[in-house]
Amino acid sequence: MQLKQWFPFLAWPRLSPAMARDEMLAGVTIGLMLLPQGVAYAALAGMPLVTGIYAALLPSLVAVLWGASPRLGVGPTALTSLLIGASLVGMAEPGSAQWVALAAWMAVMAGVVQWLLGALRSGWLVNLVTSPVLNGFTQAAGILIFLSQLPDLLGLRSSWNALFHDPSLHHFDGLALCFGLGGLGALLLLKKLAPKLPAAVMVVALCGLISAAVGFAERDGNIVGHLPAGFPSLAIPAAISMDQFSRLLLPVFMISLVSFLEVASSAQVEHRYAGTRWNENQELVAQGMAKVAAGLSGSFAISASFSRSAVTLHSGAKTGWATVFAIAMVLVTVLWLTPMLYHIPQAALAAVVVSAVINLIQPRSLRALFRISPIEGGIALTTFLLTLLTAPRLYWGVLTGVLLSLCHFLYQRLHPRILEIGEHADGSLRSRDIWNLPTIAPNVLALRMDAEWDFASSSALERYVTQVLQQQPHIQIVYLDAQPINRIDVTGVESFMRLRQSLRKQGICLHIGGLKLPVQAILEKAGALVPGPDLQLSRTNAQALITMRVSCATK
């Protein structure tokens, strides 16, 4: 058991002939999707195109062998590639040796961060990025990816600035425009009509054949061109300066966070599908090791693609063997078949990227957030706008969104829901305002706090009780329904003792009902539950109602 914890792939089932056939067929489907996406995402990251294939080899193999979710669609992804390309703008020329070295160091550094988080069992930190923040960021990232691919997609030969000052069709390559828009239309149509087909490789292959037939390369068309064949060599990336290292720190943390959010969204679907529990810490370790492997093999950071993960599940893959077969297919391509990629137009690769990220742009989800919670909708919108406005420094949008989410969380904790309760017709205690209920008795103040009794909620509860008692000086019993209170800290204990003392001085009895045993145990250790005429404990609300009514009748 201990060995399988260190090497999760040892828990995979042994391949039988039938399983090998099924996993190989699923692997071919995954590989046919991984190849064109890997090359396209390398362009998005500003990397040499062959590094997209390298990223689909050793790094992806490490991720699937050591991961807790062997059917994840590991490899290059749009969001992570965008973050890499955006973070390195101004530090080097895209595609240059310096750019590749910086991207490789980003992969190594992000890998170390993720490995440490996994080793320290800190996977819970991913929960700091709430759904609204992720929603706003991914939609903004989708728009930025789309805009970055427009020049290649439309066959723009010059710059947007030149086109603006001299509007003319001569700025566009007509054939590249056909490859881009035609390829995008074909991809979207195939995705809708035949989702199980490897649409990306079919469209890219068709565009490559047409490109070769019409002599697109000879017309100075923008094509993939020559890609080096052979397996990438393993080496420590070229040294970078301390200034460059410090400038990479924020982007590295952002890539570590966002790439793992991509992994989490895909892994949770897989484990819900299989009815198993996801081990996020093991996944962090695996993703960290994979990123380090990416940096050492001269490629860029990988993650998990939601679309490829869905294809993996729907193609019938049962184990990680399917991904291993997909990686083997990529290996065969990089060793012997790279010349076949020569004539593929860059416009076709742009179409692959755009078709993959178009689902990220969903304005309806933002509107839905505003209907559910205007504040969280505002956080999502702020993240969205800041991500767009601060590009290429995309991390400011996420960091601001996380900060706003934490502030919202703290505000809610500091302002707990405290309400007066009365007896409902069914015998339960409910909100007097919502259900229009009378008081339990004329001289009883019955309260419920829907929160933990800790440093955040303590002052709010004390303040509420004080204000009500000032308005209703005839109160003789304060009843607190403690069933929602599942935790109390030192500040909460001190608050309890101050409240009891204050009520005792006013001649008011504090009655607690439904106190949970862990909370009661802490209060007993602190000596806060010493028996006396000023304190009454009831195990249930029903017992408390009887006791209070008897007490009121005798007074």
Image (cartoon, helix red, strand yellow):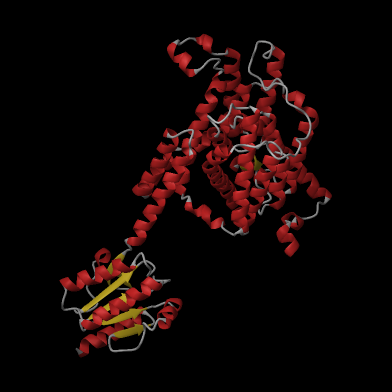
Residue 217 in sight: yes
Q: Position of residue 277 (x, y in %)?
A: 61, 59
Q: Which picture quadrant has residue 464? A: bottom left
- Count the marks: how many? 0
Q: Position of residue 150 (x, y in %)?
A: 53, 24
State the residue in front, 207 or 234: 234
Closer to us: 253 or 276: 253
332 to 553, vertically: above or below = above
On the image, the x and y values in percent for residue 36 come to 67, 31
State the image coordinates of residue 459 (x, y, percent, origin top left). Answer: 30, 67
Q: Residue at x 36, y 61 (%)?
A: 413
Q: Report whether 511 appears left or right of 206.
A: left
Seen at 76% across and 45% down, the residue is 22
**Residue reaching furthest to the right:** 17
Q: Nearer the viewer, residue 550 or 497?
A: 497
The residue depicted at 50 percent of the width and 27 percent of the height is 147
Question: Does the image show residue 361?
Answer: no
Residue under the image location 25 percent in, 84 percent down: 549
Task: Tell me if 301 is positioned left or right of 383 in this view.
Answer: right
Residue 551, quarter of the rendered image: bottom left
Q: Quadrant of the N terminus?
A: bottom right
Q: Quadrant of the C terminus?
A: bottom left
Q: Is residue 513 above or below residue 379?
A: below
Residue 134 relative to residue 179: left or right? left
